Amino acid sequence: MIFQKRTFRNLVKLFFLSPSGEVLGGHELKAICELCVAPPATYVVNYGKKKTYTEGRSSFELDKLDYLELADSSNNLLATISQRYFKDQQASLFQLMLLGGTEKGFHTEARLMEIVAAQRDLRYGYARALRIDFDPSTETKMRTGFLSTEVRMEEAKVWMFPPSEIVLGGIKGLYPLNYWSGQVVKRLADIGFELPASRLKLPGVVAFADSDAESLVELNPRYQDFVRFDGLGS
């Protein structure tokens, strides 16, 4: 199915480990913001009061950061950083989510993966086109009522592997652009998932063309629901 440009936007989610005591520096945040589709105008920390964003602002202590949200001057969501799934005394797993435009080829998203991988312990990531009537947090279609929009939580069953296994090479599915650790291919082989013949240099960025979607499904009919190239979520 082919969508018109106005019906979808690019979405990228990256998962990185942060040892106890680390901070999110202003230079890192600036690099992330430069890849947003619009300059950030406001930010929210830990679901608190909305504040005016200033470029190069002071660092955030990751140990104290549960949620960071950036929005543009029209209050459109640009990016979030939140703690996800895994936490122990030594390190926490964070999710960086960035909403992009409609650029084909995911060049901006690949650049973001390179930036985060160079500065953080990046364990997993993916980028995809997502229809604008889908909630980017859950990647499910938004249900609107008379007075409000229903908010739903992401379900663990939409992951190929339990989300808690991200640090062990678990992934959510196969997308046009992926960042895989060195363990992913082995984990896929363990469940009988067959990849097209290619030379994967891991850890690193793994890109699939649209034409690869059909061959991935043909090779792995049991896992067709996890091959997600159509912009329809999950």
Image (cartoon, helix red, strand yellow):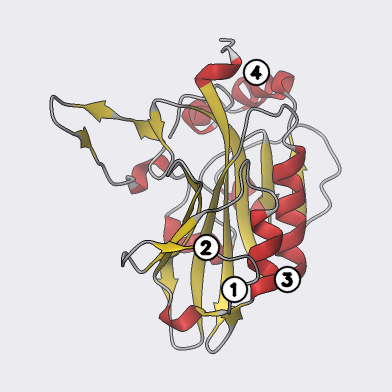
| Few, some or many residues within 10 Å of mark 1 (<14, 14–19, 20+) | few
Name the residue type under label 1.
Answer: Arg
Name the residue type under label 3.
Answer: Gln
Name the residue type under label 2.
Answer: Tyr
Quarter of the image where the C terminus is located: top left
Rendered image: mark on residue 57: 1
Disc 4 + disc 1, Cβ < 8 Å: no
Work out whether mark 1 precedes mark 3 in sequence or the reverse, and give the earlier one.
Answer: 1
Which numbered mark, 4 or 2, is in the foreground of this view? Answer: 2
Relative to 48, 125 lies left or right: right
**Residue that mark 4 sits on:** 214
Q: Residue at x 58, y 84 (%)?
A: 22
Q: Position of residue 54 (x, y in %)?
A: 57, 66
Q: Position of residue 206 (x, y in %)?
A: 75, 44
Rendered image: mark on residue 119: 3
Which numbered mark, 1 or 3, is in the foreground of this view? Answer: 1
